[in-house]
Amino acid sequence: MAQRTACVDNAAMSAAEIDAYLATLDEPKRTTLTALRDTLAELVPDAEQCISYSMPAFRLDGKVVAGFAAFKNHLSYLPHSGHVLSQLVDETAGYTQTSGSLHFPIDTPLPRALVKQLLDVRIAEIAERGR
């Protein structure tokens, strides 16, 4: 059975794959997701950029902590956990979502403070499971 989550170990290759993904997008999706990517890279500088489930993602210590994707009418932030968004109900109240994705407009990047909260919850979740 093929592995469903594949993150390339070569950081340059992974960044190039995300560059290629972003290059396929029309504006303003490309600019908005590039801003999210830059925010993620700033907030988790030790994370590896990778492709997971055919979407751009960031992996920290072997665990995917965040991902993103473009769809026809929205963009998605993917915490790679079904529990993160339920812990930030008030903070994500203005967005549509599923248990595993936060949807946001194609022309409005997620606020840096919200991305930090999403990452903090996901990283804490991983740390708790590792105990």
Image (cartoon, rainbow, N blue to C red):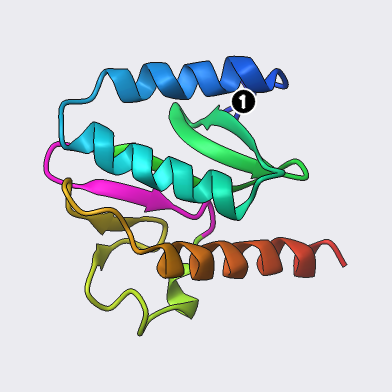
- Name the amino acid type tagged 1: Ala
User: Which residue is disc 1 drawn over?
Assistant: 6
Please tell me whether residue 11 belongs to the stretch shown in magenta. no
Residue 19 location (% of width, % of height):
42, 21
Q: Is residue 89 above or below residue 22?
A: below
Residue 83 visible at all: no
| Crowd around label 1: few <14 · some 14–19 · many ≥20 (10 Å) | few
| Residue 80 point in image, percent of width and height | 53, 51
Residue 127 position by quadrant? bottom right
- Look at 44% across and 26% down and name the residue there: 54
Q: Secondary structure at mark 1?
A: loop
- Image quarter in which the C terminus is found: bottom right
Question: Residue 69 at what x, y percent from top left?
Answer: 34, 38
Location of residue 48 (image quadrant): top right
Q: Residue furthest right?
A: 131
The quadrant holding residue 43 is: bottom right
Report whether 23 appears left or right of 126. Answer: left
Principal secondary structure, stretch drawn in magenta: loop
Please give the range of residues in magenta: 71-81
**In this view of the protein, can residue 81 be seen by the observer?**
yes
Work out which quarter of the rendered image holds the N terminus and state it: top right
Q: Position of residue 109 (x, y in %)?
A: 28, 53
